Amino acid sequence: MQDHTQEPLLEMFIFETVQLLEQLEQLVISIEKSGFFDQDAINEIFRIMHTIKGSSTMMNIGSISSVAHSVEDLFYILRENKTSGFDQSKVSDIILESIDFIKEEVRLLDSGVSNNGDAGPLTGKIRNFISEISGQQDNRQSTTADGTEEQEYTEGSNDTNRQENLKTYSSVIFFDDDCGMEGMRAFSLIHNLKDIASDISHIPENLTSDADTDTIIRNSGLKIRFMTEHTYEEVYNFLSQTIFLKKVELTETTDVAAGETDDSRNKGNDESRGENDSRLYGQTELRSVDPQQNVRSNDVSGRLSASQHSIVSVNVAKLDKLMDLVGELVISEAMVTQNPDLEGLTLDNFQKAARQHRKIISELQDIAMSIRMVPLSATFQKMHRIVRDMSRKLDKDVRLEIIGEETEVDKNIIEHISDPLMHLIRNALDHGIEPKEERRAKGKPVTAVVTLEAKNAGGDVLIIVKDDGRGLNRQKILARAKENGLVSRPDSELTDKEIFSFVFLPGFSTKEKATEYSGRGVGMDVVAKNIGVIGGNVSLSSVEGEGTAITIKIPLTLAIMDGMTIAAGGHKYTIPTLSIRESFKAKETDVFQDPDGNEMIMIRGECYPVLRLYEVFKLDTCVTNISDGIIVMVENQGKCICLFTDELIGEQQVVVKALPDYIKKFKKVRGVAGCTLLGDGSISLILDIGGLVEYGA
């Protein structure tokens, strides 16, 4: 295959395999909750593994193909023999172990590393289980990367005794509009079809190298003729599982004998096999299927939370570029309407046109942002697997409840919150949830509940991880904080919020013994840091004996944010509105120095550090007296400091720009998270509140 086609084909394979694995993982978790593998579930798993096997074989990825093939064989046995009495828990373990193996192989492929995973132990384990449930030795030889032949339990048998049962079918396949690479998708479908059919011919004939193939299939569909012993329903269901399927037409033909010659079947260039060819259309039975309506009314359809939609896959880099251009448009519009040359002029028609221009740009901005928005459902559903695995290993009975999974956030934010959420869920099960005996002794239900909730709060999203476990021990946390030298005030002056915030400090842990999941003092500080990177913050509340709730507050998008523009030393800076608690004028008498010489200010009985921005950034300014400037109190991770600035300029929506690479490469910029262009064309640096709080605390 040519190098220029390998990359998009690999990208398609990775994307679709990841989707199928996520569906499969959710399905298995749902099956475990229901308690048994019904026939519909077995068929669904078989079809998913059959698809992965076919596509990985086409891509010549032997490790993935071998594992998928082994799992497919297992479920073929379960489906065809309707074997009962097997260890369903062991089947779940095998599937999940196979999912993990394939995920790792896909991850390596995605990172450009050759997949060298050894599938032998896993496929051997599956073969042994097949022998166990079938009561006989598995004679199947494993598929290997060197291409050795194997005997398999798949549907495509060429047994000559079955030739008399062969039926001839004709089909036309239409893929989703704009799905792309129709020729390669058709090639994958034909490759999979060989497992259940023989004597396959198709139009167009060349699916991989003809430049016109995609256009032909897009306009006229993929026309296929084949022979198989399977029933109409079985073939119809098989074709209906095609990824990115828009419509399938299937006909069982009666005017072509099963034993017709190759010459009569393979007239690929004969125009008589066009749409008017009676041999290709409508002789016996014709059906069309719309995948959005092709939802089975059984339990399996209810198990999968993500319904099928008409989706166009777009590279994230293109969405980033679109958002950048919209941001530039917002800035250029402000530069026009706020141009100093217009000051004092009465321009009614201009103002009317400017308002219409602003309205259109706002709508375009909303659309561009909505394209980048994705629901949290996929991220939330992954947590079921973590709860399932940890519950087994820790011997705790835990149920995960998900609320508000339809809440949408920016695609880039999704990538930043997955790991923090994973750690918080693990922490809840390991630290928070008590063992079964302890819960019984306290009169609690043996089954603990961990709740994962998302909801909108203005321009932000709140994600709450809550458990009904033992809660945090205030005195234990305070004692450990004292041991680490973190407490400098009397105990009576410390609030619960301040004490609980110690758990977010690096190296802080109250776990006496390190486990596989926690207790090494690494984790909660990383959670706070990762959330801080995307302009969010984390807060914690707990009631001892009742449970703990951790709330993550994040912006809807990283591309555009609400900010307060301030001035210091003749320069303009932007503070994220999310981080501002209040702003006020102060008197000289309000400010004092602590024993270490740090400047502090007393506000409503509480002391806060004062950070003068002109000193931090080494600026020349005539505004040095506290009473001449403005104090802006900002907060990050429960800690507050007061920034001394020259003046407040105003609040506005700004487009976030990353700092140039050459600045980040050659100089560590403290207290600056990015930059933005203001309406007058000037540059404003966006302050990193987390860094400033750490610097001033």
Image (tube, helix red, strand yellow):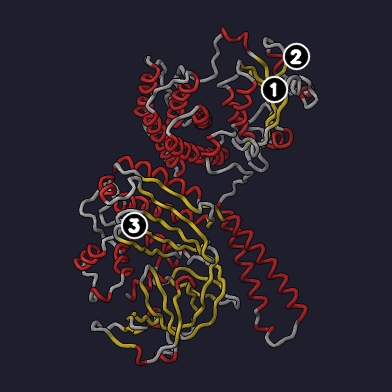
Callout 2 amino acid? Asp
Which of marks 1 and 3 precedes in the sequence? 1
Helix, strand or loop status at disc 2? loop
Residue neighbourhood size for the residue with mark 1, other residues' Cα within 10 Å, grouped as few (<14), some (14–19), many (≥20)? many
Q: Nearer the viewer, residue 575 or 236?
A: 236
User: Mark 3 and mark 2: span between their CA atoms?
Assistant: 72 Å
Whether residue 4 is visible to the viewer of this picture, yes or no, is yes
Mark 3 or mark 2: name the one nearer the start of the chain. 2
**Residue 10 visible within the image:** no
Viewer-side label of 3, 2: 3
Amino acid at dot 3: Gly
Q: Is residue 16 above or below residue 645?
A: above
Of residues 435 and 534, the one nearer the viewer is 435
Q: Amino acid at mark 1?
A: Ser
- Nearest the viewer among 94 and 550 is 550
Looking at the image, tell me whether mark 1 or mark 2 is earlier in sequence order: 1
Q: Are marks 1 and 2 in contact (CB under 8 Å)?
A: no
Residue found 60% across the figure and 41% down from its top = 308
Q: From the viewer's perspective, is residue 356 above or below residue 146?
A: below
User: Which quarter of the figure has residue 134?
Assistant: top left
Circle 1 residue: 170
Mark 2 packing: few (<14 Cα in 10 Å), some, or many (20+)?
few
Distance between the alpha carbons at the discs numbered 3 and 1? 62 Å
| Location of mark 2 (residue) | 255
Marks 3 and 2 in Cβ contact (< 8 Å): no
340 shown above or below 524: below
Label 1 residue SS: strand
For this rendering, which residue is in front, 416 or 14?
416
Q: Of circles 3 and 1, which is in front?
A: 3
